[in-house]
Amino acid sequence: MVTATAGGTSQIVPGLPAFQNRVLQPRARLLLADGDYHQTSVLTCNRPVRFKGYGIFLKDFAPRKKGGGMSGRIRIDMSIRKDPGLRFYMAGILLFTAGLSIYLVEWIFYKKVKKADQ
């Protein structure tokens, strides 16, 4: 059984009038537990949390303005998904990078050999 608790913080950036008193970088601190194993992570819009093969993503949050909204209650909507193809995706990225590196080394080497032959 996996349990999670969340505590939210946010960063309000002063400056531009259009963004004044708006939450620009919502963050949620998660405490994830599975039996005796505990993990504390920070969840943001652009940085999902990975835990035991699951991805936890921030979908929505409230309030979007300082002090505000209808009730002013802090709310965080999360999406939890298990992606079994993630390992194949990462392996493909690794193989592509290795192939591109080999190609570049070969291209540089043959360029030097051509200059030596002329």
Image: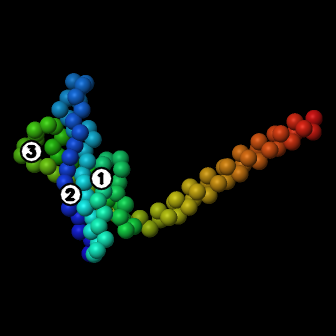
Label 1 to label 2: alpha-carbon separation: 9 Å
- Position of 82 with respect to 17 (left or right) is right
Q: Residue under circle 2?
A: 6
Residue 76, percent from left and from top: 20, 52
- In this rendering, would 26 be left or right of 54? left
**In the rendered image of this protein, does residue 108 appear above or below residue 52?**
above
- Distance between mark 3 and mark 2 Cα atoms: 17 Å
Give the vertical position of 118 relative to 10 (above or below).
Answer: above
Seen in the picture, residue 116 relative to 7 is either above or below; the reply is above
Q: Position of residue 116 (x, y in %)?
A: 90, 38
- Determine the secondary structure under disc 3: loop
The type of residue carrying mark 3 is Gly
Does the CB distance between marks 1 and 2 fall below 8 Å?
A: yes
SS under mark 2: strand
**Which residue: 66% across, 49% down?**
100
Residue at 35% across / 64% down in the picture?
Answer: 51
Reading the image, the residue beneath label 3 is: 72
Q: Earlier in the sequence, mark 1 or mark 2?
A: 2
Asked which quadrant contains residue 66, the reply is top left
The kind of residue on which mark 1 rests is: Leu
- Evaluate whether residue 39 shows in this view: yes
The residue drawn where x is 47% and y is 65% is 85
Viewer-nearest of discs 3 and 2: 2
Can residue 79 be seen at all in this image of the molecule? no
